[in-house]
Image (tube, rainbow, N blue to C red):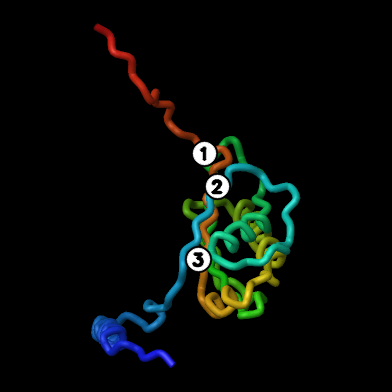
Amino acid sequence: MTRRRPGIIAAALTLAACGALLGIPKVAFAQFLTLTMEIRRDNPAPVRPTAPVNDLQDLMRALIGCWNPPPADSNSQPIDVVFRVSFKRSGELLGKPPFIEFVREVTPEQRSRYYTAVAEAIDRCSKMPFTESMGGASAGRVFRVNFIDARNRKQAEVPWLIPKTS
């Protein structure tokens, strides 16, 4: 049996007390882990994960494999999507994601397409093949998933080396 250090408990109680004094609700102290993934190409054939998920890198690979982003619009900047998800020890989804955020404003049509894409990806990944250790480490933990769409991201063209003229 491991013993907890009193300093950690005292720090948590101090944070909770400060939050209560400032009127911050307890949910503000909820823990979540952010997983940021850059999407560079379309995924026309998303698949349900089959390889064992043993660490966060495996989890990110599985989530990317499940994700089929809507077609990129060449007339506008890409849409980055953020959502939260939790898994049970068995790898099953723990409830539905409470909300989906967008980094920039989107039209109702874009919102609908991305909601559908996120729902399909979560459904595809809903029985994540966690190893025993990963299942124990991630059970009930909230993952904040950021899909950064870099498929047609416009960047300024700046030459790396500028030739000197003498």
Q: Which residue is mark 1?
A: 153
Residue 123 in the image: state x and y as whole percent: 70, 67
| Residue at (43% x, 26% y) in the render | 157
Q: Which residue is mark 3?
A: 144
| Residue at (57% x, 73% y) in the render | 134
Q: Amino acid at mark 2?
A: Asp
Q: Residues within 10 Å of mark 3 (few under 14, many from 20)?
A: some
Q: Please, is residue 116 above or below residue 92 in the view?
A: above
Residue 162 in the image: state x and y as whole percent: 33, 19
- What's the mark number on residue 149? 2
Residue 52 in the image: state x and y as whole percent: 67, 66
Asked which secondary structure carries label 1, the reply is loop
Q: Is residue 85 left or right of residue 128?
A: left
Q: Amino acid at mark 1?
A: Arg
Q: Are marks 3 and 2 in contact (CB under 8 Å)?
A: no
Q: Is residue 25 left or right of residue 111?
A: left
Q: Residues within 10 Å of mark 2 (few under 14, many from 20)?
A: many
The C terminus: image quadrant = top left
Q: Residues within 10 Å of mark 1 (few under 14, many from 20)?
A: some
Residue in the foreground of this view, choosing between 107 and 46: 46
Asked which secondary structure carries label 3, the reply is strand
Say which quarter of the image contains residue 55: bottom right
Alpha carbons under labels 2 and 1: distance apart: 8 Å
The numbered mark, 3 or 2, whose residue comes first in the sequence reads 3
Q: Are marks 1 and 3 in contact (CB under 8 Å)?
A: no
Q: Are marks 2 and 1 in contact (CB under 8 Å)?
A: yes
| Residue at (54% x, 75% y) in the render | 138
Alpha carbons under labels 1 and 3: distance apart: 22 Å
